[in-house]
């Protein structure tokens, strides 16, 4: 027997009840205990708080069945879960939407997570990004940092123009350091030192040494 059969000849009314069973992750599959007994119930579309077993709920009862309108009270310390079947769209017309948490905010999705807007601002004292594959597409990148530490197996860069300015540059290469270019121009204001166990300088057309003094050997 269902609660609907007991109230077919009366108008709809409200009654409080206790949730006996609740299907995990769904808005249906509810059983509630009312004054007249235990009955299956449907979660009203306006009730976004997912009921849990033992919660006290407000029910509307009419000829079509029992509908859970709201969760009145739950287990002390239990998290409040907002759930909906299908897509859930939050919109503030003419205003802003803020999500705040005194102890933190988590955003997780079983599928892709998209953030879109004319501007995106991220501010934090410390951050960690763990991505297996990252693709960045943009017109301009500006960064101001105090220190950068990069550890990578391979780095490939393809640029049209590269300009670097530094006070001190230190490069340590264990194996091969190779440069291939159309023209290489190296200039030092004070001293240029080239040292090696074996040194080979060759030119296909012309090799020239020019200086006020040239010492060989």
Image (tube, rainbow, N blue to C red):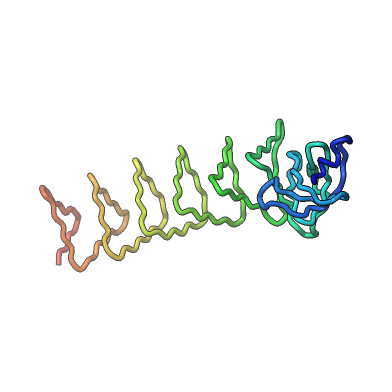
Tell me the quarter of the image containing the C terminus. Answer: bottom left
Name the residue located 24 percent from the left edge and 47 percent from the top edge.
181
Tell which of 24 and 133 is nearer to you.
Answer: 24
Q: Position of residue 135 (x, y in %)?
A: 44, 45
Tell which of 46 and 60 is nearer to you.
Answer: 60
Tell which of 181 and 208 is nearer to you.
Answer: 181
Q: Is residue 133 left or right of residue 206?
A: right
Q: Is residue 117 left or right of residue 13?
A: left
Instruction: Count the labels in the image.
Output: 0
Name the residue located 52 percent from the left edge and 49 percent from the top edge.
144
Looking at the image, residue 12 lies above or below residue 171:
above
Instruction: Check the image and name the residue furthest to the top.
Output: 94
Q: Position of residue 198 (x, y in %)?
A: 18, 66
Q: Position of residue 93 (x, y in %)?
A: 71, 31
Q: Is residue 129 left or right of residue 62?
A: left
Q: Quadrant of residue 27?
A: top right
Name the residue located 32 percent from the left edge and 54 percent from the top edge.
189
Q: Position of residue 116 (x, y in %)?
A: 57, 38
Instruction: Check the image and name the residue furthest to the left.
Output: 205
Tell which of 172 and 46 is nearer to you.
Answer: 46
Looking at the image, residue 136 lies above or below residue 194:
above
Q: Quadrant of residue 13?
A: top right
Q: Quadrant of residue 168?
A: bottom left
Name the residue located 20 percent from the left edge and 68 percent from the top edge.
197
């Amino acid at each position: 027997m269902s609660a609907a059969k007991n109230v077919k000849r009366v108008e709809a009314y409200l009654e409080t009840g206790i949730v006996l069973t609740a299907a995990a992750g769904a808005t249906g599959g509810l059983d509630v205990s009312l004054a007249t007994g235990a009955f299956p119930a449907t979660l009203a579309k306006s009730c976004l708080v997912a009921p849990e077993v033992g919660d006290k709920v407000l029910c509307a009862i009419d000829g079509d069945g029992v509908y859970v309108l709201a969760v009145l009270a739950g287990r002390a310390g239990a998290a409040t879960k907002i759930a909906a079947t299908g897509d859930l769209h939050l919109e503030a017309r003419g205003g802003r939407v803020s999500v705040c948490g005194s102890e933190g905010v988590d955003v997780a999705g079983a599928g892709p997570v998209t953030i879109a807007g004319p501007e995106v601002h991220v501010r934090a004292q410390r951050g960690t990004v763990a991505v297996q594959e990252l693709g960045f597409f943009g017109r301009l990148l500006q960064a101001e940092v105090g220190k950068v530490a990069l550890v990578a197996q391979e780095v490939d860069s393809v640029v049209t123009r590269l300009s670097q300015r530094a006070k001190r540059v230190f490069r340590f290469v264990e194996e091969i350091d190779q440069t291939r270019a159309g023209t290489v121009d190296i200039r030092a204001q004070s001293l240029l030192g080239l040292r090696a166990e074996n040194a080979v300088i060759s030119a296909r057309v012309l090799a020239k040494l020019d200086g006020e003094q040239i010492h060989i050997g």
